[in-house]
Image (spheres, helix red, strand yellow):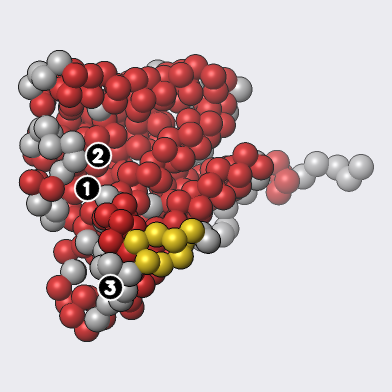
Amino acid sequence: MPPASDALLRYRPWRGTLRSPIFGALAMGRVSLRLMVRRRLFWGLYGLALMVFFFFFYGQYLVVWIQQQTAGQTVFFGGMPVKAADLTKFLDRLALNGSGHTFANYIWFQGYIAMIVLALAGAVLVGNDFHHGSLPYYLSKPIARRHYVLGKCLGIAMFINLLTTVPGVVLYIQAGLLYDWKTYYADHLRELAGIFGYGATLTVALSLLLVATAVGVRRTVPLVMVWTGIFVLCRMLGGFLVDGQNLDPRWRLIDFWNDLYLVGLGCLGVDRATLRPPAQPEVWEAALVVGGVCIACVLYLRRRIHAVEIVS
């Protein structure tokens, strides 16, 4: 071996271009999304999500076709004779007419699949960093703790928007092409802004809640149980207290997904009188609950991540 020299033993500084720590957060977000798409279960659930999208996509075509039929005419749907008026009443419940309810209902149904995927992905993206001791490695790099949280939230945000915001914009464009696009796009700009507002609300709230839950629970099975309790049991409890026991509609605020739904309807500009079920709290009350949960998650993450010892 060649003898050691002072040139080899001295510290050699980095001669490349130094970037901002925000690029580290972007890299973690990209890797997090890559970890999710490598799993077959992800693609299976994403296929179910596409089925919900295609139901609304072709449902809007079906509504326009039915509107061109006479009210008393009998049409063949699935090989069976059905009156156009009866089929219209069934489809009216989903509001497949390009209104704010159309996009709100789509995101509502899409949320069931998103909850399952996020619950399964939380332990992989965040819980394993605590379980296997990877977090000190991340924090020993020239990034702050907020960049670590931001990177994990970005990976979750990409998936949420692929399920909700992007397909919602496609449905909006389709509705404008089915109707008079010159008047539709001009009269429904509020719905387009509402889709992005609803998607941003889901992105911030769900990503922070998932990261905070995964930091506290870490394992997949307990995380699924906690996630189920938040989005299923709380919904059942809120419906029982308000609809079954006729208590104050504010009890429905314990249903976090319903709170996000109300905030999304506020972004879409939907009339409160058209909400189902009608016994609902105010939109500003739901927004306060969502904001309070986000602040609580940030404070909890700050406390737990600051407690991790780092060896630089």
Contact (Cβ within 8 Å) of mark 1 with mark 2: yes
Q: Quadrant of the N terminus?
A: top right
Q: Is residue 62 left or right of residue 43?
A: left
Report the Cα–Cα distance between label 1 and label 3.
Answer: 35 Å
Tell me the SS state at disc 3.
loop
Residue 70: % across, % down: 28, 73
* Three-letter code, disc 3: Thr
Report the Cα–Cα distance between label 2 and label 3.
Answer: 39 Å
* Three-letter code, disc 1: Gly
* Mark 3 Cα-neighbour bin, 10 Å: few <14, some 14–19, many ≥20: few
Report the residue at 57% width, 26% height from top. Answer: 128
Report the residue at 19% width, 19% height from top. Answer: 244
* Three-letter code, disc 2: Leu
Picture quadrant of residue 145: top left
Tell me the SS state at disc 1.
helix
Please tell me whether residue 123 is drawn above or below residue 166 in the rendered image.
above
Q: Is residue 37 left or right of residue 22?
A: right
Q: Nearer the viewer, residue 136 or 75?
A: 75
Residue 53: % across, % down: 44, 56
Report the residue at 53% width, 47% height from top. Answer: 48
Report the residue at 28% width, 67% height from top. Answer: 72
Q: Earlier in the sequence, mark 1 or mark 3?
A: 3
Question: Going by the picture, which residue comes out furthest to the bottom?
Answer: 182
Please tell me whether residue 164 is drawn above or below residue 17 in the rendered image.
above
Q: Can you see residue 267? A: yes
Look at mark 3 in the image and give the residue it sits on.
70
Q: Which mark is residue 203?
A: none
Residue 26: % across, % down: 46, 51
Please tell me whether residue 270 is drawn above or below residue 39 in the rendered image.
below
Look at mark 2 in the image and give the residue it sits on.
260
Look at mark 1 in the image and give the residue it sits on.
264
Residue 112: % across, % down: 42, 38
